[in-house]
């Protein structure tokens, strides 16, 4: 099944000269109180050769009816490895051109380009929960949104007191290399889980993404202070950081400040205890609200009373397998597995059919087409949901989304597809 653009509409390649056109379309698709002139044009995140516009018939010069793009993640982390992945982004349709099939056509266009580039996987953050399941994406990771009261009790960790702390204005010139180095290291061995990577822990692989990440223009502050950073070090070596912005309100009972953090990244438990100890004791604050915390993040174990943090689970990454064979062979498995998967895929028929997956635990895998009768049957969206190891095949089967044809196959495959470290991405792309 491949959709085409409506009659008269056409695709148009975009480049850096079209920044204002893309921003105009984006502010139509995602309402924003800022004007286009408020957005910085010199730190735009897109990789332009991967950005595609849609032009309506008779449109004025520069006007876009829709746009979509992707980021090139050459080293996207999957369980036990990395795989080339397209990070789908900036998907939007002008309100005047909705309900005409443009999004469907763009999604098929995106998947075709992924296949042409040899990217077996596509990943995204979903603006609305119900959109991308229609195109074969599955919710593959969750994260926690927390509201931690100031002074919340933390467990003691040996070595935490050996860390020194720096609290500074955040800047790429001063902290860019440090943050990039610590962030990459945390994805390989999150919080001391030696030898295990964190699936989904995408790094900012392009210069454009790095520049956009550090942009501190007022339009991105939403009434908060300029970007600050807390760094914890041991023996002069950075072991963790947190980017944050604060707001301050005065009440009859006193100050009620709020500390909103972006990434809070640490390399071991002692560094985490040192960093969270600082964040939870900033003057004039009453609550600390970290964003995109992995569901197994060390802070969930450090808090003496997690209930006070008011945890809320939200969907993080959504994953779509573009090439089932390459994607399944490109990750490792937590248990021995030898299973035949019967896959349904309405949009990419080349994925449909039976695939035999074979792997020893934590070793390289093989996934090849077969004529054998499937042990399990599922849609490609459910395969995407389970791909990073955060959603079990057994849970999907309990909801009727995976069908077991061979007794015992579900339990064995479900155990193999899991991963000891929960998947998550620490930044929205």
Image (cartoon, grey):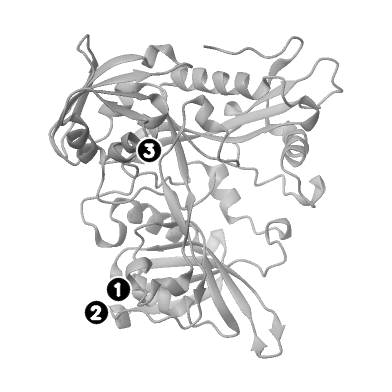
Where does label 2 land, which residue?
158
Can you name the residue that lies furthest to the bottom here? 253
| Quadrant in the picture for the C terminus | top right
For marks 3 and 1, give the one nearer the viewer. 1
In space, the residues marked 1 and 2 are separated at their CA atoms by 6 Å
Q: Check if mark 1's residue and mark 2's residue have beta carbons within 8 Å.
A: yes
Q: Position of residue 359 (x, y in %)?
A: 16, 30
| Residue at horizontal 25 percent and vertical 62 percent from the top | 192
Where does label 1 land, which residue?
270
Relative to the observer, which residue lies in front, 47 or 152?
152
In space, the residues marked 2 and 3 are separated at their CA atoms by 34 Å
Where 325 falls versus 127 (above or below)? above
Q: Position of residue 48 (x, y in %)?
A: 61, 31
The image quarter in which residue 411 lies: top left
| Residue at horizontal 34 percent and vertical 40 percent from the top | 388
Where does label 3 land, which residue?
75
Q: Earlier in the sequence, mark 3 or mark 1?
A: 3
Q: Position of residue 330 (x, y in %)?
A: 28, 30
For marks 2 and 3, give the one nearer the viewer. 2
| Residue at horizontal 59 percent and vertical 13 percent from the top | 3
Question: Can residue 413 be seen?
Answer: yes
**Dot 1: element:** helix
For label 3, the crowd category at 10 Å Cα-Cα, with few meaning under 14, some 14 to 19 and many 20 or more, is some
Q: Earlier in the sequence, mark 2 or mark 3?
A: 3
């Amino acid at each position: 099944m491949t959709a085409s653009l409506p009659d008269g509409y056409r695709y148009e390649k975009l480049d850096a000269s079209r920044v204002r056109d893309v921003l105009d379309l984006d502010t139509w698709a995602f309402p924003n109180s800022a004007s286009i002139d408020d957005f910085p044009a010199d730190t735009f995140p897109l990789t332009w050769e991967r950005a595609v516009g849609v032009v309506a018939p008779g449109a004025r010069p520069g006007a876009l009816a829709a746009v979509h793009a992707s980021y090139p993640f050459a080293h996207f982390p999957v369980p036990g490895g990395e795989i080339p992945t397209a990070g789908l982004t900036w998907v939007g349709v002008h309100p005047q051109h909705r309900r005409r099939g443009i999004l469907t056509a763009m999604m098929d266009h995106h998947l075709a380009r992924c296949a042409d580039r040899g990217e077996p996987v596509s990943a995204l953050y979903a603006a609305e929960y119900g959109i991308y399941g229609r195109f074969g994406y599955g919710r593959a990771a969750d994260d926690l949104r927390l509201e931690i009261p100031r002074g919340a009790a933390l467990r003691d960790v040996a070595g935490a007191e050996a860390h020194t702390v720096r609290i500074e204005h955040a800047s790429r010139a001063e902290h860019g290399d440090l943050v990039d180095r610590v962030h990459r290291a945390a994805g390989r061995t999150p919080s001391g889980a030696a030898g295990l990577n964190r699936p989904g822990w995408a790094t900012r692989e392009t210069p454009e993404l790095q520049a956009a990440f550090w942009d501190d223009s007022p339009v991105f502050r939403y009434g908060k202070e300029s970007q600050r950073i807390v760094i914890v070090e041991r023996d002069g070596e950075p072991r963790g950081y947190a980017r944050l912005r604060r707001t301050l309100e005065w009440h009859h009972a006193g100050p009620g400040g709020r500390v909103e953090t972006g990434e809070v990244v640490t390399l071991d438990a002692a560094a985490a205890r040192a960093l969270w100890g600082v964040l939870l004791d900033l003057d004039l604050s009453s609550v600390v609200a970290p964003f995109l915390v992995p569901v197994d993040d060390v802070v969930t174990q450090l808090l003496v009373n997690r209930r006070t943090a008011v945890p809320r689970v939200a969907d993080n990454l959504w994953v779509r397998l573009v090439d089932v064979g390459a994607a399944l062979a490109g990750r490792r498995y937590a248990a021995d597995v030898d299973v035949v998967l019967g896959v349904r895929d309405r949009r990419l028929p080349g994925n449909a059919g039976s695939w035999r997956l074979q792997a020893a635990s934590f070793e390289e895998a093989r996934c090849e087409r077969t004529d054998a009768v499937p042990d399990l049957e599922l849609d490609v969206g459910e395969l995407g949901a389970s791909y990073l190891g955060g959603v079990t095949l057994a849970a999907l089967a309990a909801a009727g989304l995976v069908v077991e044809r061979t007794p015992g196959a579900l339990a064995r495959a479900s155990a193999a597809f899991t991963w000891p470290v929960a998947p998550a991405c620490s930044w929205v792309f």
